[in-house]
Structure formats: structure tokens, C-alpha cells
Image (tube, rainbow, N blue to C red):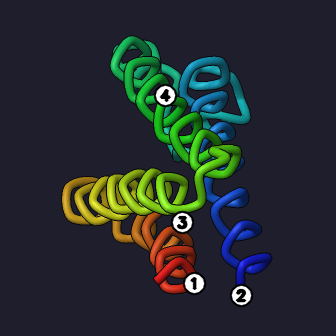
Amino acid sequence: MEILSLTLVAIVAIMHFGFMYLEMSLWTKPTGLRVFRNTFEKAQTTAVLAGNQGLYNGFLAAGLLWGIFQADDVFARQIKFFFLICVVIAGIYGAYSVNRRIFFIQALPAILALITLI
């Protein structure tokens, strides 16, 4: 179960580094426009907000990596638990406020990782 838990936490972290890259670097590029179903005009006006959101996704990913590489097993579990809960809350809020698919893309993988952690 430990290997599955570490794998799922790592996947969530990698996904959030990917979200960071998409939101901070590709927001106004064709890939970003397609992924987020945006027009170029809308992306231009929201680019600063997307960059800020991307930065927060990077913080979530960094926190999860900290939990993975923390030497103290008890503290590592607490770190991973905290950051996974943050991801779940962000995913639920995003699903409520923006698009329901955010729940499945962001919150569900974190929920699965939490289940293995518990």
C-alpha cells in the first residue's frame, strides 16, 4: 500500500506542476487555449490571474514533493495529508465555480491518494 500511496501522491504532484506550466507559460498559446477552452482575447485579459493560479498549483506540487521526500515518516504523512486536502478543496471549489470536470481532473486523484494514505 505504501508504494501505491507514494505513486498516487507523486502523480498528483506531477499533475500540479503540469497545471502550473500550463497556466503560467501556455495560457495564451494554442495548447493552453485548447486545454482551457479559451479564446485568445479572454486568455489575454486573464493571463495575470492564470499565472497567479499556476503559482499556487506549483506550491501544492512542491508541498507534496516535500511530503514524499521527508525522512520522518510521521511528519511526511502529515505533510502529504495536508497538501492533498488542499488539492481536494481547490478541486471541489473549482468544480463548483468554474467547471465540473475540475473535480475529476484535480480532486478525484487527490481523494484516491488520500484513501491510500489513510
- Which residue is identified by label 4? 54
- Which quadrant is home to the N terminus? bottom right
Using a 10 Å C-alpha cutoff, classify the residue at mark 3 as few (fewer than 14 neighbours), some (14 to 19) or many (20 or more). some
Using a 10 Å C-alpha cutoff, classify the residue at mark 4 as few (fewer than 14 neighbours), some (14 to 19) or many (20 or more). many
Residue 60 percent across, percent down from the top left: 48, 40
**Position of 38 compared to 6: left or right?**
left
**Dot 4 amino acid type:** Gly
Image vertical order of residue 49 relative to residue 19, above or below: above
Dot 3 lies on which element? helix
Could you tell me if the residues under marks 4 and 3 are in contact, i.e. CB atoms within 8 Å? no
Using a 10 Å C-alpha cutoff, classify the residue at mark 2 as few (fewer than 14 neighbours), some (14 to 19) or many (20 or more). few
Could you tell me if the residues under marks 4 and 2 are in contact, i.e. CB atoms within 8 Å? no
Residue at (49, 32) in percent of width and height: 39
Front residue of 12 and 64: 64
Find the distance from the CA under tag 1 to the CA under tag 4: 27 Å
Task: Tell me which label, 2 or 3, sits earlier in the chain.
Answer: 2
Dot 1 lies on which element? helix
- Which residue is identified by label 3? 105
**Dot 1 amino acid type:** Thr
Task: Tell me which label, 3 or 1, sits earlier in the chain.
Answer: 3
Which one is in front in this view, the residue at disc 1 or the one at disc 4?
1
Could you tell me if the residues under marks 1 and 4 are in contact, i.e. CB atoms within 8 Å? no
Could you tell me if the residues under marks 1 and 2 are in contact, i.e. CB atoms within 8 Å? yes
**Dot 3 amino acid type:** Ile
Dot 4 lies on which element? helix
Find the distance from the CA under tag 3 to the CA under tag 1: 18 Å
- Which residue is identified by label 1? 116
Q: Of the numbered discs in the image, which one, if any, rests on residue 69? A: none
